Amino acid sequence: MGMLLDARGVTKRYGTRTVLQGLDVAVGPGERVALLGPSGCGKTTLLNLLGGLDRADEGTVRLRGEALEGMTAPRLAEVRRVHYGTVFQFFHLIPTLDARENIELPLHLLGWEAPRIEARSRELVAAVGLEARAEAWPSELSGGEMQRIAVARALAARPAILLADEPTGNLDRASGEAVLALLARLTEQEGAALVMVTHSEAAAAICHRVLRLVDGRIVEGGTRP
């Protein structure tokens, strides 16, 4: 199976501080990978490099064989819109859009036609179990409900890879467990890979593979053979 994401020799520095030190990371299609480690170990920096939000000082990150660092800014923006979905710790829902409209927003930005957008949003609202809350404003939703809508929005355009940065970090235990189960189920159904930053062993347990980071190095896991 060819790699969906393949990062080689990735190093990142901020000033004189080296945050990531020559990392190799590979993610296969449909694979769920956890980036596990304490705060400050470089997990989110690595996620940003894999998602094209930042560029490595050394090394390369390839998506389906194409180097992200070699892309023009418009090409990289297009790749991120089409191939990536992102789930954040603090949801980042648009407060002036209701739950359904938040899910539909990336599809409007991609130029989908209205009937296709409506059908996809209905499908996803049902998939996250929030049919009764589809017209609610974000301010009327619980944290767990907001994160379920955020997961649906991230998957709306059927991305190849979902990036999640501490997706349960702002939730209570029960809501967090529900969101983790949802991430596992929906990425499986949608055929999307998942790369998830977490400091939680319980969250990492939904993944096929765990990469444990300490001080900018992978000390457990590593690239697949």
Image (spheres, rainbow, N blue to C red):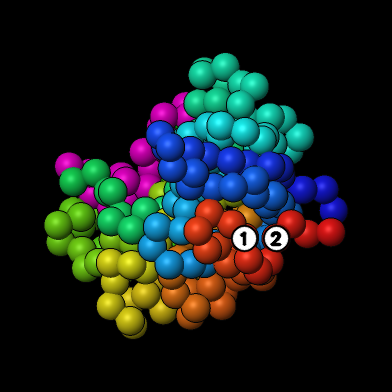
- Residue at position x 58%, y 67% in the image: 212
Q: Magenta part of the protein: which range? A: 96-111
Q: In this view, does 171 lie above or below 72?
A: below
Report whether 8 appears left or right of 38.
Answer: right
Q: Name the image quarter holding residue 75.
A: top right
Quickly name the residue at label 1. 218
Report whether 87 appears left or right of 101.
Answer: right
Disc 2/disc 1 C-alpha distance (Å): 6 Å
Residue 97 drawn in magenta: yes
Q: Which residue is outermost to the front?
A: 16
- Residue at position x 68%, y 52% in the image: 25
Residue 115: % across, % down? 46, 38
Q: Is residue 183 visible?
A: no
Residue 120 drawn in magenta: no
- Nearest the eye: 16 or 37: 16
> For the residue marked with disc 2, what is the amino acid?
Gly
